[in-house]
Image (cartoon, rainbow, N blue to C red):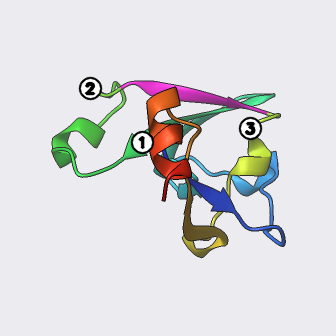
């Protein structure tokens, strides 16, 4: 699966940067913070689903936990994630196709 690259000069978030109900971004997309713990952030992914899924708590979509090791992949600014895509390694046949081009 292809994934965006996080810019080298990006400003990483700290626990104090998160607020319940506020949005933040990762390489996977846009998130809404739903809870702040002592060492973790809980959030729901905001995408093109029915907006009723985002009314809560409780939420009808899964909440994800971000721990202190995940914070360096979070930003308040979506533009900190480059538009470039890094191709994955793929299957051996995919790599063979790429090598022949």
**Cα distance between the residues tagged 2 and 3:** 24 Å
Do labels 1 and 2 touch, CB within 8 Å?
no
Label tally: 3
Image depth: mark 2 or mark 3 in front: 3
Label ID, residue 70: 3
**Residue corresponding to mark 2:** 60
Image spot of residue 17 (x, y percent)? 74, 56
Label ID, residue 45: 1
Question: What residue range appears in magenta?
Answer: 62-67
Residue 82 vs residue 12: left or right?
A: left
Mark 1 and mark 3 lie on one chain; the one further toward the N terminus is: 1
**Residue lying at the far front of the rendered structure:** 100
Mark 2 and mark 3 lie on one chain; the one further toward the N terminus is: 2
Whether residue 30 is visible to the viewer of this picture, yes or no, is yes
Image spot of residue 38 (x, y percent)? 80, 28
Mark 1 and mark 2 lie on one chain; the one further toward the N terminus is: 1
Neighbourhood count class around disc 2 (C-alpha, 10 Å): few under 14, some 14–19, many 20 upward: few
Q: Is residue 68 magenta?
A: no
Rendering quarter of residue 25: bottom right
Do labels 1 and 3 touch, CB within 8 Å?
no
In terms of secondary structure, what is the magenta stretch mainly? strand
Front-most of 76 and 38?
A: 76
Element under disc 3: loop
The structure residue drawn at horizontal position 56% and vertical position 42%, both measured from the top left corner, is 88
**Cα distance between the residues tagged 1 and 2:** 11 Å
């Amino acid at each position: 699966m292809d994934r965006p690259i996080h810019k080298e000069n990006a400003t990483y978030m700290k626990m104090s940067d998160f607020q319940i109900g506020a949005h933040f971004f990762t390489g996977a997309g846009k998130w809404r913070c739903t809870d702040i713990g002592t060492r973790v952030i809980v959030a729901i992914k905001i995408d093109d689903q029915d907006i009723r899924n985002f009314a809560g708590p409780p939420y009808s979509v899964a909440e994800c936990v971000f721990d202190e090791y995940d914070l360096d992949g979070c930003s308040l600014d979506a533009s900190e994630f480059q538009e470039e895509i890094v191709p994955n390694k793929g299957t051996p046949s995919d790599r063979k196709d790429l090598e022949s081009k």
